[in-house]
Image (tube, rainbow, N blue to C red):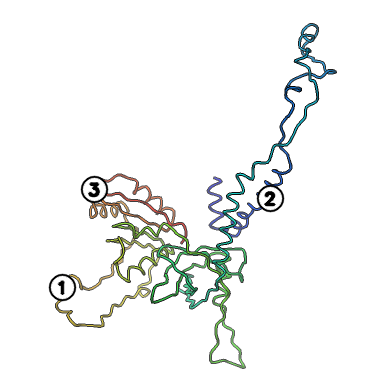
Amino acid sequence: CVILLFLYIMVSNYEIFWYTHNLFIIFYIILMVHMVGGALKYQTNIEAHPPGCLRANQSSTEQQGEDLEQREDEEGRCREDAHFQPHYPQTWLWVSGPLCLYCVERFYRYIRSSDPVTIVTVVRHPCDVIELRMLKKNFKARPGQYIVLNCPGVSSFENHPFTLTTCPTENKETFGIHLRVVGDWTERFTQLLLPPPKIDLEVLPMFQQRIYPKLYVDGPFGSPSEEVFNYDVSLCVAGGIGVTPFACVLHALLDGWTGFRLQRLYFVWLWQENRPDYFNLKLYISQTDGLQSMSEEKYRPLSSRLLVGRPKWKLLLDEIGKSNKHKRVGVFCCGPKGISRTLHRLCNSARSSGTTFEFNKESFC
């Protein structure tokens, strides 16, 4: 119950999670005070004052007469009072190493994230989704990685992870993310990116340059989605905004499959409702030389098929297993917990085709 409550607070109240998470600083301070304060002590004169000995003016109520005279001999008497000395502090041996590594890592991240970030474009999509394109000098990333975004205009101490949907390439240095407006931080951040228009009735400028808030980007950081290209066959399952980790993967494959181990990709995307006019795909060919000689199979018309309802996961995995016998298939999921649990359970089930399904759960969407 405690773990479920912790996960609920982390997802629904990220600010509470973040600020309470930083209470570890107070914990380390109290630990140091406890270490140097000498709260734990040990006895230094056990031979002169063994545990359970009787003082010269102390009598035992449990034994009388001869029994008392036998116990109050030289060995049973306390020759002096007990002396105690604090333990030599050894906590620093176990704390200093991880603490130094943490400080070095935080300093490195501070230097790396201090470079200026230029916001190129901001686009508002349906369903409260904001697309943000940015530019940063010497920024390099791979598909599947994520960044940590900080906006001092919203909060100087909050850092939020977002998966990259576009990575820098040789021809285009910009990178982008898609974020869903859920919670206080994203709402305030969206208001800074897309403020309501202010119309002056007296002066209407022909062109008004939009002023974006200052941003700091730390990263990129690795995630399970990077392993998509390390399999011969991969299955990517996304639910709603969980498509963001795989959007960058699809962008990378548009440039060509060469250089990747991946030979086949299965992609499943689930959402609650569909807009027929939202996804419009158009293909153009600029050169027609040699088109007639090309095989019809290679250039047959592209058809878009929309299946209504939820996927039959077992049938889907069985179909993939029959098509890829005795192979390792990477399964990557970013979406609701129900889908993740079902896929995880099915991936661990044995199959007669000999296909091994390796499940990978994406945490940040």
Depth check, mark 3 against mark 2: the one in front is 2
| Secondary structure under the numbered disc 3 in the rendered image | loop
According to the image, label 2 marks what residue?
29
Residue at mark 1: 295
Q: Which residue bears the numbered disc 3?
A: 353
Q: CA distance from mark 2 to mark 1?
A: 72 Å
Secondary structure of the residue carrying numbered label 2? helix
The kind of residue tagged 2 is Ile
Which x, y percent locates residue 24?
63, 52
Q: Earlier in the sequence, mark 2 or mark 1?
A: 2
Q: Residues within 10 Å of mark 3 (few under 14, many from 20)?
A: some
Q: Amino acid at mark 1?
A: Ser
Residues at marks 1 and 3, CA–CA distance in whole angstroms: 33 Å
Q: Residue furthest bottom?
A: 202
Instruction: From this view, report whether residue 160 is shown above or below residue 123.
Output: above
Nearer the observer, 312 or 258: 258
